[in-house]
């Protein structure tokens, strides 16, 4: 897959630090974060943008990975693009608890020599951004132009705004919300669903191939809820071929993503509520939703914007006129490219 005018092949890097303290009081003996960077850090360390990612996606935001796949926001990040890597140094970090190389339930617990699995420590979205802060400090980043990301990445963007109010000039929170209601129910539902899966073994499923089919079907259902059918319809007008294409997309994810990470991240989400701390935000906010997103419908925007205004936050709202639902920010990037460019220019 070519990304014309893009970054080409990008390198996956790893940051690590010892004895990382969590809000729960527990300590991770080692924290690893996998990440990618695009562009060059300025000598003063103040031209960086942190790109954050969704619930079950990865740090691959732009350029091409080793499999030739373009990043989720490849249309927006690169030379001359809205997030211009000729100007900005972009860091895209795989979040704590994810399944793409960062410390997570599949990591080895040094106390047992086996994967943490369901015993992975409880953590929060604030812990996720604090881990990212440690990475950025190690890279020499002194100030962020912005934190930008979709979905769970938008949670992180809002959380940065309240946890480290002076660390960035802008927040770009896309197809997301500043709080996450029903968090405990989501965790309970996931646990109940996985309990029915062959090979689950109370979460100690590692090495058991029986989970693959279950995870593939789970991913197919998720992609459909996100709007994948609308995205693929022009290329696969035949429903049977489109269904096959969705399964083809789902299986690599099913092989890579640990269901324990889904539970751990859902638990982190259950603690999340940046809305109550809106008054702490110092950065300008660009809040972007998609017209057809069923997860974060535009109907939530008036309430969010009213609360930002009440907290005296300089906030702008934009709605992507897309039929691609929750996937609109990447799939229809052209429809909000100018808004993002103008917002970033306004931070200079």
Image: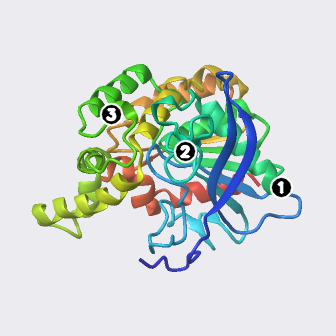
Where in the figure is residue 292, as x and y percent of width and height? 32, 44
Disc 1 to disc 2, how far (Cα)? Answer: 27 Å
**Mark sitting earlier along the chain (1/2):** 2
Residue 302 horizontal side relative to residue 9, left or right: left
Identify the residue position indicated by label 1 in the image.
140
- Residues marked 1 and 2 touching at CB (< 8 Å): no
Q: Which residue is mark 2?
A: 107
SS at mark 2 in the image: loop
Residue located beneath label 3 in the image? 201
**Which residue is nearer to you in this view: 253 or 347?**
253
Quadrant the N terminus occupies: bottom left
Instruction: Measuring from the top left, give residue 185's x and y in whole percent.
Output: 37, 21
Q: Secondary structure at mark 3?
A: helix
Q: Residue sitting at 62 percent across and 34 percent down?
A: 111
Ranked by sequence position, the earlier of labels 3 and 2 is: 2
* Foreground tag (1 vs 3): 3
| Residue that extends furthest to the right in the rendered view of this protein | 44
Q: Could you say which quadrant of the image residue 240 lies in?
A: bottom left
Res 204 label: none
| Gap in angstroms between the C-alphas marked 1 and 3 | 43 Å
Q: Residue, x 47% and y 60% (percent of image)?
A: 72
The residue located at (70%, 69%) in the rendering is: 39
Residue 296, placed above or below residue 137:
above
Q: Residues within 10 Å of mark 3 (few under 14, many from 20)?
A: few
**Tag 1's secondary structure?**
loop
User: Is residue 314 shown to the viewer in this render?
Assistant: no
């Amino acid at each position: 897959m070519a990304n014309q005018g893009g970054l080409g092949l990008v390198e996956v890097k790893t940051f690590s630090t010892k004895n990382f303290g969590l809000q729960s009081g527990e300590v991770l003996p080692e924290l690893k974060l996998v990440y990618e960077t695009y562009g060059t850090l300025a000598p003063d360390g103040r031209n960086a943008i942190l790109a954050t990612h969704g619930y079950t996606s990865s740090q691959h935001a732009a350029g091409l990975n080793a499999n030739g796949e373009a990043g989720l926001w490849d249309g927006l990040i690169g030379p001359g693009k809205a997030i211009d890597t000729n100007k900005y140094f972009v860091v895209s970090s795989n979040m704590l608890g994810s399944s793409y190389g960062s410390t997570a339930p599949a990591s080895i617990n040094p106390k047992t020599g086996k994967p943490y699995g369901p015993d992975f420590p409880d953590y929060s979205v604030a812990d996720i951004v604090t881990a990212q802060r440690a990475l950025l400090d190690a890279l020499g980043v002194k100030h962020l132009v912005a934190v930008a990301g979709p979905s769970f990445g938008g949670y992180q963007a809002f959380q940065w705004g309240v946890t480290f109010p002076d660390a960035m000039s802008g927040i770009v929170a896309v197809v997301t919300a500043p709080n996450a209601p029903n968090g405990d129910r989501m965790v309970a539902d996931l646990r109940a669903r996985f309990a029915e899966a062959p090979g689950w073994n109370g979460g100690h499923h590692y090495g058991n191939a029986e989970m693959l089919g279950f995870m593939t079907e789970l991913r197919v259902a998720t992609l459909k809820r996100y709007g994948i059918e609308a995205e693929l319809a022009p290329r696969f007008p035949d429903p049977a071929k489109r269904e096959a294409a969705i399964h083809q997309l789902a299986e690599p994810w099913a092989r890579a993503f640990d269901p324990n990470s889904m539970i751990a991240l859902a638990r982190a989400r259950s603690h999340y509520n940046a809305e109550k701390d809106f008054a702490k935000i110092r950065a300008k906010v660009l809040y972007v939703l998609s017209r057809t997103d069923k997860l974060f419908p535009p109907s939530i925007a008036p309430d969010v914007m009213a609360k930002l205004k009440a907290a005296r936050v300089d906030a702008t709202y934009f709605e992507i006129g897309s039929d691609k639902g929750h996937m609109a920010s990447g799939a229809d990037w052209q429809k909000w490219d100018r808004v993002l460019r103008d917002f970033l220019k306004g931070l200079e």
